[in-house]
Amino acid sequence: MSKQHATYSPRWYQDAFRWFYSCLLALIIPFAFLNLIKRGMTRQKDYNRRRFERFGYVAHAPKADGYLFHCVSVGEVVAASVLIKRIMAEQPDRQITVTTTTPTGSARVRSIFGDTVHHFYLPYDLHMAMAGMLRRIKPSAVFITEVELWPNLIHACWKRNIPVVVVNARMTDRSARRYKKFPILFKPMLNKISHVCAQGQRDYANYRFLGMPENKLTLTNNIKFDQASALNSAPQGFMQLEHSERKVLVAGSTHEPEESLFLDVYQTLKAEYPALLLVLVPRHPERFEAVARLINKYGLNMIQSAQSHTVPQNCDVLLVNEMGKLNAVYSAADIAFVGGSIADRGGHNALEPAAYKLPILMGPNIYNNPVICAKLEEAGALHIVDGQSDIQALLTAWLTDPEVAVAAGEAGFNELSKNSGALAKTMDVVNRL
C-alpha cells in the first residue's frame, strides 16, 4: 500500500457522493459538448477538431514519468511558465505536459513553449475520462496551477499514487465558504492532495480553514512576482509611433463595459491632450469584432494591430486584435489600466505593467489578487478608481505632471523586485516529491 493510501481512506458515503457528483456531471456534459461544437463551428475551429480530448482521448506522452501541469487559461499558463522553465532547465530529461481548458490558454502554451511540451485540453471531470488520460500520460506528479480542484482528477491520481500539488494556490474567501458547505465532496478531495503552495496569507488561512494540515501547506507567496520579474522590460517594438512624443494609455485585458468607459474618458481628454493614444486590448478574442464596432460608433480613428503595427499621427485608438501581445504593448506604454476590475471579474495581473515601470489604474473588483494589489497600492504604484470621474481626474494628474507618473511606476517595479522568491520555495516542494 502506498503512503498516501496508508494515511487516508475515504468513508463509503464520501465515495458514494463523489459518484453522485459524477452522475450529475454526466447529465450536464452533453449540453456543454453541444455548445462546444457550436462555438467551434463559428469561432474556434481548432477547439472543435480537438473536442474528443475532453473525454480523455489524448495522444500518448512522448516519455512516461513526466510532470503534468494543469493551467485553466492564459493567466495560469503565464504564471506556471516560470516554474516550468526552471524545471526544464534543472531536469532536461523530464517530460512536461500542459493541459488547459480554453483555446486562449492553449494558444498561449504554444506561443511560450512551442513543441517543447506535450499539450492537450483537460478532459471533463469524469472518472473514466481522467483515468484514461492518466494511463496515456503516465505522469509521476500532477501540478494544478492556482485553482480548478476537480474531485475525479484528484481521486484518479490518488488511486494511482500520483502526487498532486497545487502551485501558486489561490483560495478566495468566497470559494472557501462554498467548499465548506459541501464537506462530503471537498474534504476527501483535500485529503488526497499531496501539497499546497499558497500564494498568500489569505489563501494559506483558507486552506487551513478547510482542514488542510499544516505539514501539507507551504506559504510560498505569489509566483507571479517571479514571472513578472523575468519579463524583459526593454521595449519590444510592437508599436511604431509616427510621433514619439505621444503618450500611450493602455487598457489591458478588458471586458465589457470597460472599453466604452475608456473611450468616454479618451474623448473628454483628447482636446486637452491631443498627443494621447488609447490602446485597447480585449481579454477574449471573440470580442475583437464587437470592440471594433464600438470604436467606430464613437467616430474615432482606429488602427487594428493585425492589419498594421504602425500608428499614424491621426490615429486615436489602437485595437490589439491579436493574442499574446499585451506585454509588448506594456513595453511601449506610459500608463496602464488592468481590466476585469471595473467589470466584476476579480481583476487581472497588475504585476505585468509593474514590470515595465508603469503607473497602474484598477477598478474596485480586485479579489482575484488582493495581496498583489494591496502591496502595489501601498507602494503608491496602483490606484483604485471607481467610475469615469475618478479615472479622468487621475489621468489628468499624471498627464499634467509626468514625473509623478514615473515615480509611481518606479515604486511598482521596486515592490515587484522586493517580493520575488516564490519560485525558489516552490522548487523546494517539487524537489521533495
Image (cartoon, grey):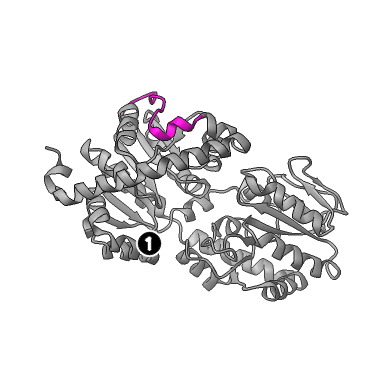
Q: Which residues are magenta?
A: 50-64
State the image coordinates of residue 284 (x, y, percent, origin top left). 61, 48
Q: Is residue 182 visible?
A: yes
Question: Would you say the magenta stretch is mainly helix, strand or loop?
Answer: loop
The image quadrant of residue 333 is: bottom right
The residue depicted at 81 percent of the width and 66 percent of the height is: 267
The residue depicted at 22 percent of the width and 35 percent of the height is: 160
Residue 198 lies, with reference to residue 31, above or below; the image says below
Give the class, few, some or many, for how many residues have Cα within 10 Å of label 1's Cα (few <14, many ≥20): few
Residue 209 lies, with reference to residue 140, above or below; the image says below
Where is the N terminus found, in terms of image quarters?
A: top left
Q: Horizontal placement of 273 versus 99: left or right?
A: right
Q: Horizontal placement of 303 versus 84: left or right?
A: right
State the image coordinates of residue 148 (x, y, percent, origin top left). 39, 50
Q: Horizontal placement of 204 versus 120: left or right?
A: left
State the image coordinates of residue 7 (x, y, percent, origin top left). 13, 48
The residue depicted at 46 percent of the width and 61 percent of the height is: 419
Where is the C terminus found, in terms of image quarters?
A: top left
Which kind of residue does numbered mark 1 sit on? Ser
Q: Secondary structure at mark 1?
A: helix
Q: Reply yes or no: does residue 333 show up in magenta.
A: no
The residue depicted at 43 percent of the width and 57 percent of the height is: 222
Residue 287 lies, with reference to residue 306, above or below; the image says below
Which residue is labeled 1 in the image? 175
The residue lying toward the viewer, choosing from 332 and 32, is 32
